[in-house]
Image: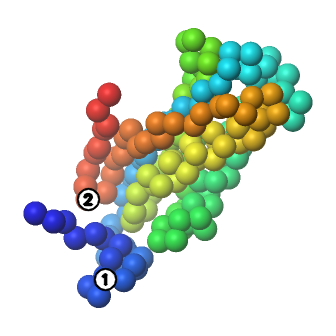
Amino acid sequence: MSQKLSHIDDTGQASMVDVSEKNDTSRVAIANGTIRMRPDTFELIMADEIPKGNVLGTARIAGIMAAKKTSDLIPLCHPLPLAKISIEFEPAEDKTGFNIVATAKVIGKTGVEMEALTAVNVAALTIYDMAKAVDREMVISDVRLTHKSGGKSGTFDASA
């Protein structure tokens, strides 16, 4: 059984989904991703000794800014009045990187999954950019939606 894609109209063309008839609801999305690096790079970031400046603080701001600009980056995304976007960095126990967690919230007619995913990606890219002078082998991986709630489709929680 094939499912109709919401961003494809009856003629097969890409189109923005019409959400005008939907009700405003409280919506939350959480996305995660990782960036791995050498232990010495991790230590430099934790000690705030990367020459470009405070890596995690800058990455947090970059992720927030990116979430706010998601509709400018992803062609069919609706612009959303975000109520909240937060970015957290969880150091890996083996001191070889960080898990990045972005939480996006809105009261609106459509979800905030793309905003949370965009925030994680741009935060990770910012870490890479700021630390690449000492480690060009960093790896960004496992970016995915881990939770969403609100709207017609209800709650989604990714399996571990």
Q: Which residue is mark 1?
A: 12
Which residue sits at x=68%, y=15%?
A: 39
Residue 34 placement, left or right of 58: left
- Give the camera-side residue of 41 and 27: 41
- Residue 152 is tagged as 2
Distance (Cα) linking label 1 and label 2: 24 Å
Q: Position of residue 23 (x, y in %)?
A: 33, 67
For marks 1 and 2, give the one nearer the viewer.
1
Could you tell me which secondary element the residue under label 2 belongs to?
loop
Farthest residue in the top direction? 94
The colour scheme of the drawn protein is: rainbow
Residue occupying image coordinates x 74% and y 16%: 40
Residue 90's quadrant in the figure?
top right
Residue found farthest to the bottom: 11
Q: Is residue 115 visible?
A: yes
Q: Residue at x 35, y 73 (%)?
A: 7
| Mark 1 Cα-neighbour bin, 10 Å: few <14, some 14–19, many ≥20 | few
Q: Please provide percent x and percent y for residue 42.
A: 70, 20
Label 2: few (<14), some or many (≥20) within 10 Å?
few
The type of residue carrying mark 2 is Lys
